[in-house]
Image: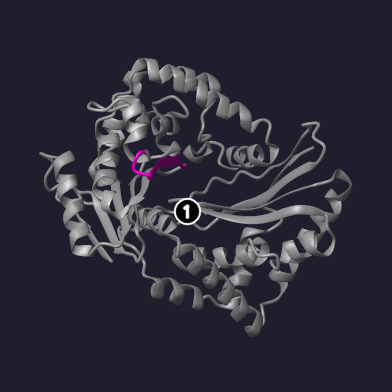
Amino acid sequence: MIVGTADCGLRYAVRRSGSAVAYCALSIRCGTRDEAGFHEGIAHFVEHTLFKGTAHKSASTVNACLERLGGELNAYTTKEEIVVHATVLKEDLRKAASLLFELVTEPAFPGKEIEKEKGVVVDEINSYKDSPSEEIYDRFEELLFHGHPLSRPILGTASSVRRISSEELHEFISEKFLPENMAFTVVADIQEERLENMVRRIAAGYFSGIKDRQSLDCIVCGQAQIGNVFDRTVNKRNHQVNCILGNYAPSLYADRERVASALLCNILGGPASNSLLNSVLREKHGWVYGVECSYTQYADTGIAAISFGCEKSNYEKCMSAIAKEIRKLQSSELSPKRLSAAKKQFLGQLAIASDNGESQCLSMGKSLLAYGTVMSDSQTREKVESVTAAELQNAASGIFRESSSSRLVYL
């Protein structure tokens, strides 16, 4: 892998693979939390409307540019980043890379297309109301981060989206889409030196005249002290109960604590059927279709949350079982044998996920934006292997402390 910085300040990382398929992504350090002074949902709306034409291509041309080659073009928005990415055959990589740069540096935001896309996004917002298991997580974050930029919903509201104008979109990207806030990543079966030269040439072409800008450095933030604690029940008149409970967790920059927290959440409610909560709630008792313990890291804080849906008659039993499993993790350390097995499972999941070229490419971009570099597989393994049983116990006691945990229930 080669990691570097172009003259314009854009960071890049290129990695050789053994596949005929190539992946590239342009990640921008700008998300929902950066919307102050703009209408809510503008970051997500920008992501949608980047595809609606550029100074040189119409919306239909943009959409067909890679599809006619058998490739794919996509994008997503989070609280802290906008990512545009493409998947193509390796011989078409240059076309894909150039298109991504063109989309973010020369968007047209035509008025007619903007108005059409507002209807699409409003429909997306309304569709969440029909999916309580998805809506509840967004609402939980809004309550937990109330008074903080992270409380803003990614999609915005129907009324705020309808007020976004083409002029505001141009203003937003001119302020936020700076090369020093971007990272470009490539995973392809091409010599890494050739990939690096390609990236540097394309970046120089689209950011011509921008020289010796400040390079992208990680943003080291202190842990946000927000302090919202709540226990709220909302009558949605659903046929089942949806519940989410959780708390603040270590940030991207709490190095040892975040690794311990990630391992803890995987042990408690990871994707495997033998995770503690899956074993008890689903496999043993059949009370839920699925239960998950997720951990999301932000620059200045994080969130760890347990979510599940069940029949109303099983709700109290689920809550009691969850509390029991948490108390076990808080009251005693895992044995060396259990800790070793948990680490092996976690590392195996990470290795399998990283074997996917697209996931690898996107992960590299996130790492560049956060830390200015990309950790090797051996560095990741070393960090996971170094977690102690005491650190896991401390993570369980801190994150899931009953007095500071919050809960949201949809009935």
Count of marks placed on residues: 1
Image quarter hosting the N terminus? bottom left
Residue 385 against residue 231 in the figure, above or below: below
Residue found at x 12% / y 39%: 208
Picture quadrant where residue 400 is located:
bottom right
Image location of residue 161, percent across then percent down: 48, 22
Residue 74 colored in magenta in the image = yes
Residue 13 lies, in percent from the top left, at 28, 58
User: Is residue 216 visible in this depiction of the protein?
Assistant: no
Q: Is residue 331 visible?
A: yes
Q: Position of residue 385 (x, y in %)?
A: 50, 78
Q: Nearer the viewer, residue 192 or 63?
A: 63
Q: Residues within 10 Å of mark 1 (few under 14, many from 20)?
A: some
Q: How is the image coloured?
A: one colour
The C terminus: image quadrant: top right
Magenta-highlighted residues = 68-78
